[in-house]
């Protein structure tokens, strides 16, 4: 179904306020926050919330939950609710997630609208529950006796889609999504061609099942799950951690530079981390130019970024442009308007900033949809009167998170765009364009620096409001250096005022500058991996950076000696050989690696120091 036509009922709602005089609940308050999913990391996989996590992945709501470990929990998994209590048990949590999701009925996870199918789903779930008290061998054989008959001419236990019945049965036989567990089930059954084995292989290859396994296992161990005995991932480079919920072949990362300057060392960290994870998980890397501001962008910068990526040895799978999605983004903006989730505002910029700081609603916040559409159309036409207006999201002006206080999503700019010319007269902001295009292009993990942490909630709100596929955000600390400017605006000032020879000046922290100075690419990768995906912001020293570079060069640099032509003194070794004797000594080019060969050193009684 078209996500654009869905009503955004899954937009995070404001917490309800208990009316005065209301009776106090007798239910025990939970220590878990709302949407916090907790379980013991020492428990075996089958005692973790694998059913609930699979349902959350299927309904595209997994990013709404905070998975936490609790070594003191001994009664199975639990999840905190908005009313302060908790729901316990894997199946109960799974049903709750499915019922509250607007997508569960579309997917028929609980059986859909068909009462007979719903009853059959419930009976399978109850049947799976009754088997949990037995040993695995008995459970596997019991489920096989049931499914070998039921699946003789079907793919799923009930109906024509994956339901909680399949997930519960898969869980009760040991949730054999990993290769070793699947082999154990096959050993118990013996017959590798029976319908249950076909069903098990189908289940374990399902993306939602694999993501749920990775999430369930990743909370307690560093070793990642192995779904295919013949497809091993490279070990994690020291300093780098696994991507949450990532599975082989199902990872897509993106690097979205704005073509408003040359890449600097901070950008290098971002793009190399995105490339590392994309290649390790055998996924895709998208380089997308965030060209939404004609006032700053130039064709020159776009070409230079492509060249800089080549210098870094980065080969993206595809290069895209946000400008290719302008019409699509505009339609999504109209969806926000028609659903009452955005409004047009002509409040002057300084006044708007003050209202947001003081948490005061705009006078246009309750604007009728018809008026909003009229002013949005006027703004997009390029009319001078329309330049006073901008589109703002209607989120929460009382939020402690300033990025949720009705941010600007669209504004007029009549300057020609370097790719689309004068086709458009208004452009989306990065805050609107990024979550939309990330979802459309299939990005699974958006790697963002910690400076965007406050915007992550806004990012999630936009995707939820538009019914888009949710993208997992993975934060890391930006790379800062002592006494170093990384702002593109400030670096441009140095270039424009002639304080440097250009963007490739060896003193500049640009990619071109450090490479011209002698940067080794493997050293750069090692240095960045050593920083890893840590969220701790650290200001580093250049001498450590160049020390890492020296270590790498030391592995292959041949040894030669030189003496200053002027500043030297002659030493005579009285019993040394004469020049006419032509005496030579053979020594290694690289003492640590004799395979680099030998070099000859001439010996003489006259030596220069």
Image (tube, rainbow, N blue to C red):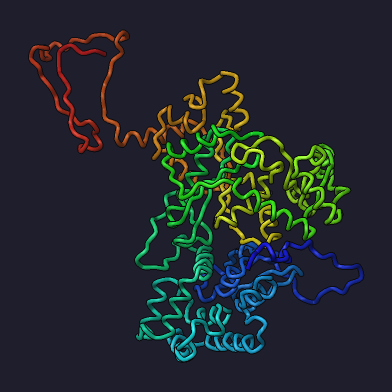
Q: Quadrant of residue 598?
A: top left
**Quadrant location of the N terminus in the rendered image:** bottom right
Which residue occupies 82% across, 39% down? 385
Judging depth in this view, the residue of 84 and 247 nearest the camera is 247
Q: Residue 73: tell me if it is visible.
A: no
Which residue occupies 55% across, 73% down? 50
Q: Position of residue 484 (x, y in %)?
A: 56, 29
Judging depth in this view, the residue of 261 and 529 nearest the camera is 261
Would residue 483 appear left or right of 368 to someone viewing this image? left
* Residue at the right extreme, as displayed: 21
In the picture shown, does residue 602 fall above or below 146?
Answer: above
Would residue 497 appear left or right of 351 to someone viewing this image? left
Q: Quadrant of residue 430?
A: top right
Q: Quadrant of residue 336?
A: bottom right
Which residue occupies 65% across, 72% down? 97
**Quadrant location of the C terminus in the rendered image:** top left
In the picture shown, does residue 434 fall above or below 585?
Answer: below
* Residue at the left extreme, as displayed: 581
Judging depth in this view, the residue of 594 and 187 nearest the camera is 187
In the picture shown, does residue 539 fall above or below 106?
Answer: above
Q: Position of residue 44 (x, y in %)?
A: 50, 73
Q: How many marks?
A: 0
In the picture shown, does residue 345 fall above or below 414?
Answer: below
Q: Position of residue 129 (x, y in %)?
A: 57, 85
Q: Residue 313: tell me if it is visible.
A: yes
Judging depth in this view, the residue of 103 and 478 nearest the camera is 103
Q: Position of residue 332 (x, y in %)?
A: 69, 55
């Amino acid at each position: 179904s078209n996500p654009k036509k869905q009503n955004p009922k899954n937009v995070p709602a404001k917490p309800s306020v208990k009316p005065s005089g209301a009776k106090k609940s007798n239910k025990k308050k939970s220590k878990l926050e709302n949407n916090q999913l907790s379980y013991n990391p020492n428990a075996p996989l089958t005692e973790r919330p694998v059913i609930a996590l699979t349902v959350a992945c299927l309904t595209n709501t997994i990013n709404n939950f905070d998975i936490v470990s609790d070594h003191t929990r001994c009664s199975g998994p639990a999840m905190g609710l908005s009313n302060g209590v908790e729901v316990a048990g894997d199946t109960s949590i799974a049903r709750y997630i499915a019922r509250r999701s607007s997508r569960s009925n579309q997917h028929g996870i609980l059986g859909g609208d068909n009462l007979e199918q719903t009853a059959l789903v419930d009976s399978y779930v109850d049947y799976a529950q009754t088997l949990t008290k037995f040993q695995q061998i008995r459970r596997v054989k019991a489920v096989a006796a049931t499914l070998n008959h039921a699946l003789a001419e079907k793919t799923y236990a009930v109906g024509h889609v994956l339901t909680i019945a399949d997930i519960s049965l898969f869980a009760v036989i040991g949730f054999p999504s990993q290769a070793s567990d699947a082999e154990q089930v096959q050993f118990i059954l013996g017959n590798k061609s029976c319908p249950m084995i076909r069903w098990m292989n189908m289940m374990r290859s399902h993306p939602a099942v694999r993501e749920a396994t990775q999430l369930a296992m990743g909370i307690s161990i560093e070793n990642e799950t192995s779904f295919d005995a013949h497809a091993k991932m490279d070990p994690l480079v020291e300093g780098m951690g696994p991507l949450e919920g990532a599975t082989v072949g199902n990872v897509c990362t993106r690097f979205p530079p704005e073509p408003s300057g040359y890449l600097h060392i901070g950008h290098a960290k971002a793009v190399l981390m995105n490339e590392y994870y994309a290649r390790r998980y055998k996924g895709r890397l998208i380089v997308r130019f965030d060209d939404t501001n004609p006032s700053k962008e130039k064709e020159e910068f776009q070409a230079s970024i492509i060249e800089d990526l080549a210098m870094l040895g980065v080969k993206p799978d595809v290069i895209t442009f946000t400008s290719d999605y302008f019409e699509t983004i505009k339609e999504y903006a109209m969806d926000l308007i028609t659903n009452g989730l955005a409004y047009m505002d002509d409040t002057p910029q300084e006044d708007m900033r003050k209202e947001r700081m003081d948490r005061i609603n705009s006078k246009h916040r309750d604007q009728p949809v018809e008026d909003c559409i009229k002013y949005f159309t006027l703004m997009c036409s390029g009319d001078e009167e329309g330049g006073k207006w901008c589109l703002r999201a209607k989120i929460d002006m009382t939020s402690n998170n300033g990025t949720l206080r009705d941010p600007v999503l669209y504004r007029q700019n009549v300057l020609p765009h370097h790719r689309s010319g004068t086709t458009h007269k208004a452009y989306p902001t990065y805050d609107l364009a990024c979550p939309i295009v990330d979802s459309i292009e299939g990005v699974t993990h958006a790697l963002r620096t910690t400076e965007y942490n406050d915007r992550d909630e806004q990012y999630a709100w936009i995707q939820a409001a538009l019914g888009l596929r949710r993208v997992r955000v993975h934060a890391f600390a930006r790379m800062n250096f002592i006494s170093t400017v990384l702002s593109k605006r400030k670096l441009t000032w140095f270039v424009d005022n002639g304080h440097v020879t250009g963007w490739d000046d060896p003193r500049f922290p640009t990619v071109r500058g450090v490479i011209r100075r002698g940067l080794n690419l493997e050293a750069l990768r090692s240095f960045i991996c050593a920083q890893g995906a840590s969220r701790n912001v650290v200001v580093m020293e250049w001498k450590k950076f160049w020390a890492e570079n020296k270590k790498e060069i030391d592995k292959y640099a041949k040894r030669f000696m030189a003496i200053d032509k002027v500043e030297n003194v002659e030493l005579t070794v009285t019993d040394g050989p004469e020049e006419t004797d032509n005496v030579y000594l053979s020594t290694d080019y690289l003492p640590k690696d004799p395979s680099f060969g030998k070099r000859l050193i001439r010996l003489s009684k006259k030596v220069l120091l």
